[in-house]
Image (spheres, helix red, strand yellow):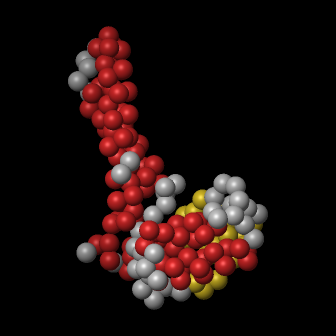
């Protein structure tokens, strides 16, 4: 399957570890947090010490290995945001595409807004399911944390292998 190709699987595992690490870091107030994963690790954005990131990433990896797969899912994930936006925008577009005149567009606008909201509501449970089945992989395989590097204020790079 395409999701199990090395480049993709490594990214999915790092994405899961990124989410789990953010869950660990969220136990203490750190303000805004974000992350971005790739096949060689992930970046964390936020006001963390390098030591806090090491501890959180190590615990996250251990807990994922122990079967806490729910840690791979994060409500703030871009997968959720993209799913909501795509469904809402698509339903709104479907309503508006039949309007041939400006007057028709104006009359359909409230309907398009309602359909957009319906699209977002339908999509809400789909984002976590997409994370679980497509964009993350909670089975860490032989993934290891190699290093945590402080890039600059508010940015850490976690390197995995």
Query: Where is residue 12 shown, x and y percent of the image?
Result: 42, 71
- 128 shown above or below 59: above
- Total marks shown come to 0
Query: Where is residue 106 shown, x and y percent of the image?
Result: 35, 15
Which corner quadrant of the image does residue 146 belong to? bottom right
Q: Which residue is found at the position 55% from the left and 76% from the top?
A: 60
Q: In this view, does 32 lie to the left or right of 85?
A: right
- 76 shown above or below 110: below
Q: Which residue is found at the position 39% from the left and 76% from the top?
A: 9
Q: Which of 97 and 60 is in front in this view?
A: 60
- 116 shown above or below 56: above
> Farthest residue toward the bottom?
142
Q: Does the rendering let one see residue 39?
A: no
Query: Where is residue 136 shown, x and y percent of the image?
Result: 41, 68
Which corner quadrant of the image does residue 108 belong to? top left
Query: Where is residue 90 shown, x and y percent of the image?
Result: 31, 38
Q: Which residue is found at the position 59% from the left and 66% from the top?
A: 22
Quadrant holding the N terminus: bottom left
Q: Nearer the viewer, residue 22 or 14?
A: 22
Q: Which residue is found at the position 42% from the left and 49% from the top?
A: 82
Which corner quadrant of the image does residue 134 belong to? bottom left
Q: Is residue 159 left or right of residue 7?
A: right
Q: In this view, does 96 lie to the left or right of 84?
A: left
């Amino acid at each position: 399957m395409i999701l199990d190709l090395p480049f993709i699987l490594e990214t999915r595992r790092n994405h899961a570890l990124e989410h789990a690490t953010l869950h660990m870091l969220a136990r203490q107030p750190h303000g805004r947090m974000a992350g971005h994963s790739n096949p060689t690790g992930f970046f964390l954005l936020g006001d963390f010490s390098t030591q806090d990131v090491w501890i959180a990433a190590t615990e996250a990896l251990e807990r994922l290995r122990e079967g806490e797969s729910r840690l791979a899912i994060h409500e703030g994930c871009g997968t959720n945001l993209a799913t909501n936006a795509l469904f809402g925008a698509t339903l709104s577009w479907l309503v508006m595409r039949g309007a041939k005149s400006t007057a028709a567009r104006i009359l359909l606008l409230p309907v398009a807004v309602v359909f957009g909201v319906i699209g977002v509501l339908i999509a809400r449970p789909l984002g976590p399911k997409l994370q679980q089945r497509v964009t993350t992989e909670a089975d860490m395989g032989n993934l290891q944390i190699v290093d945590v590097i402080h890039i600059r204020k508010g940015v850490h790079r976690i390197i995995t292998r």
